Image: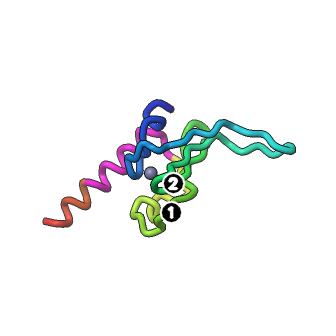
Amino acid sequence: MQMLFGKSCVICHADKLNFRKKKTFLGLSSPENFFCENCGSLFVEDELKWKLIQIKDKFNPIWQQFQQKSFYVREWVDIVQKEAVGKEGSLV
Ligand SMILES: [Zn+2]
């Protein structure tokens, strides 16, 4: 599951994805998350799914449709692929 995500960012495909392990600090724990240095997308672990909670470009169509939503990695890959296909289609 994490391999797919660990290689490159599902949003922008940049190879700048950082994985942060679960941290506990002063009794507060932050969930495992992925952060992309290129597009600023931040995914947090949500019961085996990944929730998109942040991105630099708030006009990104994926952000606008799927912010604060949780999907499995393969579902995110699917969503981004469909979005890319949709863009090509609209040019015709
Ligand atoms: Zn990215």
Q: Which residues are magenta?
A: 71-84
**Label pair 1/2, CB-CB below 8 angstroms:** yes
Q: Residues within 10 Å of mark 1 (few under 14, many from 20)?
A: some
Q: Quadrant of residue 21?
A: top right
Secondary structure type for disc 1: loop
In the image, residue 75 lies in the stretch drawn in magenta: yes
Left or right of 48 in this view: 13:
left
Secondary structure of the residue carrying numbered label 2: loop
Q: Please rate how many residues cluster around mark 2, counting C-alpha atoms within 10 Å: few if below 14, some from 14 to 19, many from 20.
A: many
For residue 56, the mark is 1
Q: Label 2 CB, ligand 1: below 8 Å? A: yes
The percent position of residue 17, horizontal first and vertical second, equals 49, 43
Q: Amino acid at mark 2?
A: Ser
Residue at numbered disc 2? 41
Amino acid at circle 1: Lys
Instruction: Compute the Cα span from label 1 to label 2.
Output: 7 Å
Sooner in the amino-acid sequence: mark 1 or mark 2: 2
**Percent of width and height locating residue 86:** 25, 58
Which residue is at a point 46% across and 30% down the rendered structure image?
3
Q: In this figure, what is the number of numbered marks?
A: 2
Give how far across and how far down residue 7 sits, in percent.
43, 36
